[in-house]
Amino acid sequence: MKKYWKMLLCAALTVGAFTACEDVPAPYNIPTEQGGGDTPIPTGIEVTCAEAVELTSQLADGATSSETYTITGYITEIVGEVSKNQQTFWMADTPDGGRIFEAYWANLPSGVTEFKAGSKVKITGKLTKYVNNNTGKMTAEIKNAAVEILEEGGGVTPAEGIEVTCAEAVELTSKLADGGTSAETYTVTGYITEVVGDVSRNQQTFWMADTKDGGKVFEAYWANLPEGVSEFKVGSKVKITGKLMKYVNTSSGQMTPEIKNATVVILEEGGGDTPPPAGKEVTCAQAVELTNALADGATSSETYSVTGYITEVVSDVSRNQQTFWMADTKDGGKVFEAYWANLPEGVSAFKKGMKVKITGQLMKYVKDGQVTPEIKNANVVILEEGGGDTPPPAGKEVTCAQAAELTNALADGATSSETYTVTGYITEVISDVSRNQQSFWMADTKDGGKVFEAYWANLPSGVSKFEVGMKVKITGQLMKYVKDGQVTPEIKNADVEILEGGGGDTPGGDTPGGATLADFANGDFETWADGQPTGWKSASTASNATLAQSTDAHGGTYSVKVGGATSGNKRMAYKEMDLEAGTYAVSFYAKAATADGGSVNPGYVPMKADGTVGSYVYGGYVNDLSNSDWTKVDYEFTLASKTTVCLVVMNSKNPGKDVLIDDYTITKK
């Protein structure tokens, strides 16, 4: 009996011991504990770092591979301190290969207190595709990897580059092609003048200049925090090292000289945020008057502080900046523009109705003869919180024909003193969307032709573009624009209310997604099955891209997201189809899925008799795609005889980011 009770007591103690070990705080896994002998490291499919990145890029965003992989390479950078017997590091196929693949909170082997740069290691686990929601940046990684150290490294060796100042770095960057990266490595020394975002994965973005009050001269985009530093501070003197990059916003044409993922050495510690620069105090109306006196495209030598109310927010937040219009009164309309103004700390977005003070240099921006008075990248102080959107202004109600008659009565180039509201149908859309505006013609009937123009009208909230057939009400002051003796009656920058939805383009224009060939369909990507757009999968190797459904559409409800990779070009291909001899016109709309931009190349590939692909034929790269506006891509090709082909859209490996495609059409000329 005593033996029986002893057995029960041992069993109870065993259960209690296991229960006490169950509660392990996330996000860490329990590292392998060494007891009576090492636990063998699991084995996986052997790959290099470069191969691991390519495999990871083919996963869906946030997905983890079903297979286990073993990656061999060198530790190139240690990211953080040891925590719970784990540490994060970057690795590459060579000791100086940079940040290629990440071991995120990898488990330290028994007897090892920390990882060291330069060590040759073998890590094992499942691949994960981590994508930053704010930047769209992809990180290929294994979380909580088991690690075997093959060769011991000697620790971190600081990177070295050609020594330049911030001003010299800007000059060198400006000579690069748009989106280009320098072949050489540079070390830029200067002072941090503004910290842009919070720390993420031991990185943070900041602006720097050659002096403490030099403003936003050169950007360190997601720079690496040095060991032991929790965040960057304004005023710190730093040395950053990496390759120069010329980032160009395709919507605005604005160039940002930068180094991405720079290595940073802090030379002098800063004291944190400094007060925003002071400028000469002016009203919005005074700022417009001063701006108009500048030459076209010129910037004032003086700094100004413009106080007023936000009357319209133009764009979404990007890189902690947002564009808005302001005036001296809450209902004053679009008087002065703060173009990509900096959000103050703790503010997630600007709101209509806010009273603000913006500081910077005045600039006279001119496009199509239209002057926009603005400050770019203004520092903003919020004086009063806004209440959000207010109803659009009301004007005297007139038809399109009446508006044209009233406009013709004005002097050439003159603007009416009264505000009018013109109701009618959109008969032609003239331009693509730019700065959340688009131009169109309207009439009193759907087929009434070009009667009255809405010149760079404002898109209502939630509307991505104007469409032919929409019934709209536009409000503003009439203007009589005259060029070469031709009169155009118009309202510039009208506020628009959509009364009825449109039916798209009318005959004579493009028909998005139209099945213009008998065996071509689903160019609008509205039909999906098993997570794939119907028809967009070849039986050959022409299809090698990962496709996903996106609700960010040019037309309809869906577009297709074509996955990209820096390791190689990726192709979306339509199923094999027979085309007769002749010339074909292809058209589609493309957009970058991330702020890092994108590049596409339209084309086709003829199929061989055995079902394999021939030589790819492309029309040319369309680079620097915007992630805010759709770009129309046109391509023509000629077939000498009846040919079986796959239509393809290549997502270029430079920059290798995801792109969106919509409204693909093909017609025979």
Image (cartoon, rainbow, N blue to C red):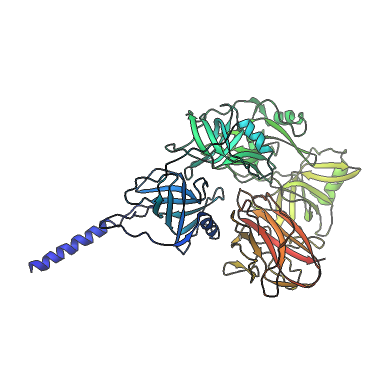
Of residue 121 and residue 196, the one placed in the foreground of this image is: 121
Give the vertical position of 639 relative to 288 (above or below).
below
Q: Name the residue located 84 percent from the left edge and 53 percent from the top edge.
A: 450
What is the residue that sits farthest to the left in this orientation?
Answer: 1
Q: Which corner quadrant of the image does residue 372 belong to?
A: top right
- Is residue 181 something one can see in this rendering? yes
User: Residue 197 at x, y = what percent?
Assistant: 53, 40
- Is residue 557 something one can see in this rendering? no
Of residue 537 and residue 319, the one placed in the foreground of this image is: 537
- On the picture, is 622 further left or further right than 8? right
Of residue 437 and residue 151, the one placed in the foreground of this image is: 151
Give the vertical position of 405 relative to 268 (above or below).
below
User: Residue 2 at x, y = what percent?
Assistant: 8, 66
Q: Which corner quadrant of the image does residue 290 belong to?
A: top right
Give the vertical position of 35 relative to 332 (above or below).
below
- On the picture, is 326 further left or further right than 188? right
Q: Name the residue located 41 percent from the left edge and 55 percent from the top edge.
A: 145
- Quadrant where the image shows the C terminus: bottom right
Q: Which corner quadrant of the image does residue 23 belong to?
A: bottom left
Total number of numbered discs in the rendering: 0
- Quadrant where the image shows the N terminus: bottom left
User: Residue 355 at x, y = what percent?
Assistant: 60, 34
- On the picture, is 643 further left or further right than 99? right
Of residue 161 and residue 274, the one placed in the foreground of this image is: 161
User: Residue 328 at x, y = what percent?
Assistant: 67, 33
Q: Name the residue located 80 percent from the left edge and 53 percent from the top edge.
A: 442
What is the residue that sits farthest to the bottom in this orientation?
Answer: 610
What is the residue that sits farthest to the right in this orientation?
Answer: 485
